[in-house]
Image: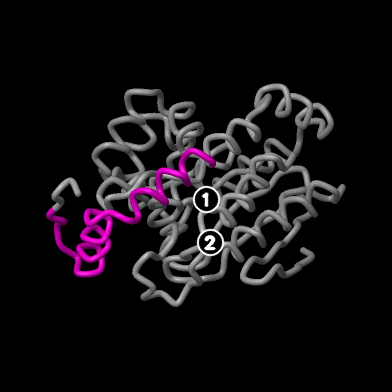
Amino acid sequence: MTAERYGDVSVDIGADHVAFVELHRPPANFFDVGLIRSVAEAYEDLDRDDRCRAIVLCAEGKHFCAGADFTGASGAGRSSPGDLYDEAVRLFAAGTPVVAAVQGAAVGGGLGLACSADFRVAGPRSRFSANFARLGFHHGFGLSVTLPAIVGQQRALELLYTGARVDGRIASEMGLVDRFVPEDTEIRTEAQALAAEIARSAPLAVRSIRATMRGDLADRIRSAMRDERAEQARLQKTRDFAEGIRASAERRDPDFEGR
């Protein structure tokens, strides 16, 4: 394998034409604009690399990605939604198919990152949550577009309204996970197997099919993110948002007032 580094993101390309794009901010892999920019740069370089025909998006540590750290406890950088989403839309504009290997949590923006991939692989201890409303916040990362497309409008509304956490098996039953493995240690192996299966098809044909099937996805994501970040900016000024962040840091249920 050949290896390259993009900040806290590494890229390894195997002989099977599968590239592993791995986040290295364990254990929770909180992101900021720099991390998302690094993933986008890796994707764009891989688009131009004939050795790569499919990508496995994965992460070092206990969790796939816990999104943005609003409490600041992790030490991850703070980013404005505008800057972050300008980089995030690049993930959707890239041309190479992506399989996300989701171990542990894909929470908040981490769920958005998982949903930016074409497919998701998970195990029994994987868990998914659009926890924004439990923080007094509006969802982001293009989930207005991706989540209904993956699980359907009603399931998406339920996940977004309640902030419910679902495990890998339930996520598989609702269509959020494409391949469920019985052991968490098999997640990355199964993700690679799916990516290799894609890579065995004619690469020009796969990219052509993907472009047709996705259509104007990147443009729709860009438009949705403008609306999402406007609502996020509005709600960040509320007492409910402050309470949601406090409650999360203190590991207790929030007491919202609707103010």
The residue sitting at 33% across, 49% down in the picture is 235
Magenta segment's dominant SS is: helix
CA gap between label 2 and label 1 equals 8 Å
Looking at this view, is 89 or 118 the one in front? 89
Q: Is residue 202 visible?
A: yes
Q: SS for tag 2?
A: strand
Rendered view: 45 above or below 213 = below
Q: Residue at x 76, y 68 (%)?
A: 4
The residue under label 1 is which amino acid type?
Ala
Residue 59: numbered disc: 2
The residue labelled by disc 1 is 101
Q: Residue type at mark 2?
A: Ala
Kindly indicate whether the residue at mark 1 contacts the one at mark 2 (C-beta within 8 angstroms).
yes
Residue 176 position within the rendered picture, expressed as x and y whole percent measured from the top left = 42, 35
Q: From what the image shows, is residue 119 above or below residue 245?
A: above
Q: Look at the image and give the residue range highlighted in magenta.
A: 226-255
Q: Position of residue 225 (x, y in %)?
A: 53, 41
**Residue 93 falls in which quadrant of the image?**
top right
Tell me residue 109's x, y (percent). Answer: 45, 51
Toward the viewer: 23 or 220? 220
Q: Earlier in the sequence, mark 2 or mark 1?
A: 2
Tell me where residue 131 appears, x and y as whole percent: 31, 48
Is residue 70 one of those drawn in magenta?
no
Q: Residue at x 65, y 59 (%)?
A: 37
Which residue is depicted at the point 73% across and 28% down? 211
User: Any mark on residue 219, and which?
Assistant: none
Left/right of residue 43 with respect to residue 171 in the rendered view: right
Q: Quadrant of the rendered structure where residue 158 is?
A: top left
